[in-house]
Image (tube, helix red, strand yellow):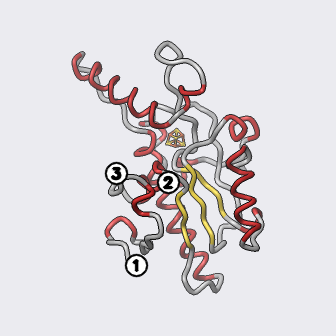
């Protein structure tokens, strides 16, 4: 059955990336390890699978070092479509950089506001309900499968961390590296 992000809570009809190819999550739904990347890259879009480009190779190497295989972990992204700055604004690979996309969106919304038009929503905001639902379901499945701590969710990069933590981490992932949050994550302070 074809994966439909809207069934998991994604607000696709309000998202500026609506209509773009969707790269669904992958992996056992009750794995104790969940990795959340930022957005699909070109290889991921081409093959419709998350983390299969250079970042996927690094992830697999890291997993192997710790005795895990890719097929044992759950992999998803903060947004399931690829943010893309319009070619009329920017060219080259920089168009697909999420930070550049958000800066473009901000500038575009200033223009929309001046023209009295509705603001464009952030794709990260539109996809967040889907991600958080997925994480909650995953936590329950991991507990039911006998993992006493449930699922351990690891954001890979700023946008993943900020989406999971409801944008409470504007200072960047390096500042929260090593911190542990409970899965009622949005309302909690980190423990040591
Ligand atoms: S990024 Fe998420 S919310 Fe936006 S269209 Fe893709 S799946 Fe839907």
- Residue receiving disc 3: 170
Q: Earlier in the sequence, mark 1 or mark 2?
A: 2
In what quadrant of the picture does the C terminus appear? Answer: bottom left
Nearest the eye: 7 or 131 = 131
Distance CA(mark 1)–CA(mark 3): 20 Å
The residue lying at 45 percent from left, 51 percent from top is 128
* Mark toward the start of the polypeptide (1 vs 3): 3
Q: Count up the numbered dots.
A: 3
Whether the residue under disc 2 has CB within 8 Å of ligand 1:
yes
Give the side of residue 146 with respect to residue 121, left or right: right
Q: 62 above or below 42?
A: below
* Residue wearing tag 2: 130
Placement of 136 over or under 76, stated as above or below: below
Query: How crowded is the residue under tag 2: few (<14 C-alpha within 10 Å), some, or many (20+)?
Result: many
Residue 184: x and y, percent? 39, 71
For this orientation, the residue located farthest to the top is 88
Q: Are marks 2 and 3 in contact (CB under 8 Å)?
A: no
**Residue found 37% across the figure and 36% down from its top:** 121
Q: CA distance from mark 1 to mark 2?
A: 28 Å
Q: Nearer the viewer, residue 78 or 19?
A: 78
Q: Position of residue 135 (x, y in %)?
A: 52, 65
- Is the C-beta of the residue carrying label 3 under 8 Å from the nearest atom of ligand 1? no
Mark 1 secondary-structure assignment: loop
Task: Give the labeled residue for mark 1.
Answer: 192
Q: Residue at x 53, y 55 (%)?
A: 8
> Residue 181 — which label?
none
Q: Percent position (x, y) of residue 49?
A: 72, 46
Nearer to me, 146 or 165: 165
Q: Secondary structure at mark 3?
A: loop
Residue 152 % position (x, y): 56, 72
Answer with mark 2 or mark 3, whichever residue precedes in sequence.
2
């Amino acid at each position: 059955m074809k994966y439909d992000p809207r069934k998991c809570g994604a607000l696709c009809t309000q998202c500026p990336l609506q209509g773009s190819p969707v790269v669904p999550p992958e992996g056992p739904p009750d794995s104790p390890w969940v990795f959340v990347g930022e957005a699909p890259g070109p290889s991921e879009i081409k093959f419709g699978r998350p983390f299969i480009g250079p970042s996927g190779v690094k992830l697999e190497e890291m997993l192997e070092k710790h005795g895990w295989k890719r097929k044992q972990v759950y992999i998803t992204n903060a947004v399931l479509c690829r943010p893309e700055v319009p070619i009329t604004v920017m060219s080259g690979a920089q168009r697909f950089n999420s930070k550049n996309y958000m800066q473009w969106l901000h500038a575009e919304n200033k223009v929309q506001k001046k023209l009295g038009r509705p603001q464009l929503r952030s794709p990260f905001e539109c996809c967040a309900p889907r991600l958080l639902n997925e994480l909650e379901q995953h936590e329950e499945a991991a507990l039911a499968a006998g993992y006493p701590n449930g699922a351990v969710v690891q954001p890979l990069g700023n946008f993943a961390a900020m989406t999971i933590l409801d944008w409470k981490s504007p200072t960047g992932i390096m500042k929260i590296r090593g911190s542990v949050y409970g899965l009622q994550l949005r309302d909690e302070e980190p423990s040591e």
